[in-house]
Amino acid sequence: MDSLTQIPKIGPKTLSKLDKLGILTPLDLLYHFPSRYIDFSHITNIINTKENENTTITGRLVSFQNIFTRSHKNIQKAIVADKTGQINLIWFNQPYLSKNFIVGETYSFAGAVSLFQNKKTLISPVSGQYNTGKIIAIYPETSGLTSNWFRKTIQNQLQTLLSNVNDTLPKNILEKYQLLDLKKSLKQIHNPLNSNILSQARYRLAIEEILSLQTQSFLSKKDWLTKRPKIFLKNNLKINQKIKRLISNLPFKLTDSQQKVWQEVESDITNTDKVTNRLIQGDVGSGKTIIALLSCYLTHLNKSLSLFIAPTEILAQQHFQTFTKILNKNKVPIFLLTGSNKINLNKIPPNSIIIATHAAIYQKDYLKDKVALLIIDEQHKFGVKQRSFLASLDLIPHCLTMTATPIPRTISLTLLGNLDISVIDTLPNNRLPIKTFLVPSFKISQCYSWIQSQILETKCQAFIVCPFIDVSETMASVKSAKAEFEKLTTIFSKLKLSLLHGKIKPKDRETIISDFQKNKTNILVTTPIIEVGVDIPNASIMIIQSADRFGLSQLHQLRGRVGRGALQSFCYLFTESINNKAQNRLNFMEKNSNGLKIAEYDLKTRGPGEMFSTIQHGFPSLKLASFSDTKLISLSQKILLDLVIDKKFNLNSLIPKHISKDNIISN
Ligand code: ADP
Ligand code: MG
């Protein structure tokens, strides 16, 4: 079968409903898995039915009534009897049911037994061979396509749907890992015989799901490894010495972690046999920028062009300043290329460092065959379109991506197998842990006055992050930021405040930030646009309003704007929520400062969508497996390794046609 229309009763109307659920082919239908099940396999005599238990009964239909109430609703009432007794049945607003039943005939019904008007009653029971006497599947539905419809259609077509299915795993693997074969698993997941075999089926299919993602990253890495750099970077004695000198002249000593990561990066980008595709992960404030700077400097010393892309103008500007400060003495040509700062690329020397926002996209024609090294900062902030631009560069440059989002091992094993990963796993040792406090509404004014005196006393600075989390700031949210700003100006009457949000012109934003950097203003009231990268070591106090509305990983990013220098930093999480869950999550923030721990907690409590809205657009959603299932994911990894060494095995067969190619993370 190759089209859904070959299934009886599926016409254009049903097709468009199926389309809404992403079901376009018979295979999609087969892979439309139930979200849960109800166990109606317990078949009892009517007399033995128990309240609150799911059950199937069989008996003669004694009566069936369609009753219309005064409020224009209608109820269907029936009585069914077997040799042991009788039971009431009730449905709401399903008058058509009367056509399905003939009084006097025998039927099976399944449902949960309740007491209704003091009588044992099955409320909205189901009937028929697809629904009774067994475990029934509940599907993700859409209006007009009920679980009942899916059960009937899929069970009727199951043999046909399965006839095209070949097992993706060889026999020896199925045996070695005691896995159910694919056909059986697909059959059981829709129409389970018992709960034991159902869980085996779900397990097998969950492995399938993870394995296919792992295979995609594996193949993509294999493919990447066939590429050769077009512009070679080398590392001879002279270059090496210059880099060493630069490192020893830095205002700080590199941490051991930074040194280790720099060694990994350095040997990677000067390896002439392969093109670098490396992700540098380091918690906020761990010092990733300097790795970028050293890489660009090495490229410069090779008389080649490097391009360092940041997600916001503020950040590009800041990197430009940092680079200029550190590299100026060495006469390195550094250029800033942003939407508001266009430059003529034809006039720049070939050994330049360009620091850009995605405005660089418009210079693609110039850049496509000149960039030897491409670095993407805070890569999760880039949209899909921008990343596909990067993929479209003719010449594939050495590619470094940087992210502060910690990556649980399960995720890197599943989705990032195509990348090499370097981790900066310690913070510079001049840092004190940020003291974090949850502040309930009634303590807010006390907190404000403490902050005011602290700022007056120590000359430190503060961020106040306003309560809306909409990143694409709307006019409404800007209005509320302005209102909040007015309020805060009167509260902090002895201090200078400024307001920063996405609707302020880039030039003005620069001034606001640079005034804050120079400590001309004491408090920066801002939207979460400061979340990424902004580095102002003298700012040591942060307030996050309505903290409960943020994901923990995002809170961690925001909090990372303070604690960047040697000062003791403080972070105050304001919340009006008395919701227990929210409290627990924020308490976790109070007690934990390790980004990975926070991410793993986020992953467990809110699922990957939450945390990975911060790392990756288009993060694949799993139907059966879970990204926090360490056991399953390492097992699947083992299977993959077995398959990789099996020369006869074609890995492509592990990438099922129903899984979209977009799942793969690449640069
Ligand atoms: P991130 O990893 O968040 O991008 P940055 O590269 O912006 O962090 O570094 C954060 C701050 O720490 C900067 O002010 C930077 O100058 C400083 N820094 C970086 N490395 C060190 C170090 N080894 N010792 C002390 N301070 C450092
Ligand atoms: Mg950074």
Image (tube, rainbow, N blue to C red):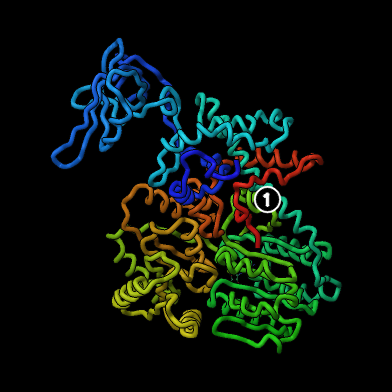
Q: Quadrant of the C terminus?
A: bottom right
Residue 249, quarter of the rendered image: bottom right
> x, y percentage for residue 142?
41, 46
Task: Give the residue at x 45% y 24%.
Answer: 134
> x, y percentage for residue 267?
79, 63
Residue 52 versus residue 15: which sits nearer the camera? 15
- Left or right of residue 272, residue 333 in this image: left
The furthest residue to the left: 70
The quadrant of the picture showing ligand 1 is bottom right
> Is residue 253 among the parts visible in the rendering?
no
> x, y percentage for residue 237?
86, 73
Q: Quadrant of the N terminus?
A: top right
- Crowdedness near tag 1: few (<14), some (14–19) or many (≥20) residues, C-alpha within 10 Å: many
The furthest residue to the right: 237
Task: Give the residue at x 53% y 52%.
Answer: 599
Residue 285 versus residue 211: which sits nearer the camera? 211
Residue 638 versus residue 334: which sits nearer the camera? 638
Residue 84, quarter of the rendered image: top left
Residue 367, quarter of the rendered image: bottom right
- Left or right of residue 237, residue 18 in this image: left
Residue 389 versus residue 109: which sits nearer the camera? 109
**As shown in the figure, which amino acid type bears the numbered disc 1?**
Gln
- Left or right of residue 474, residue 367 in this image: right
> Is residue 467 among the parts visible in the rendering?
yes
Task: Give the residue at x 75% y 73%.
Answer: 372
Q: Circle 1 is placed at which residue position?
A: 216
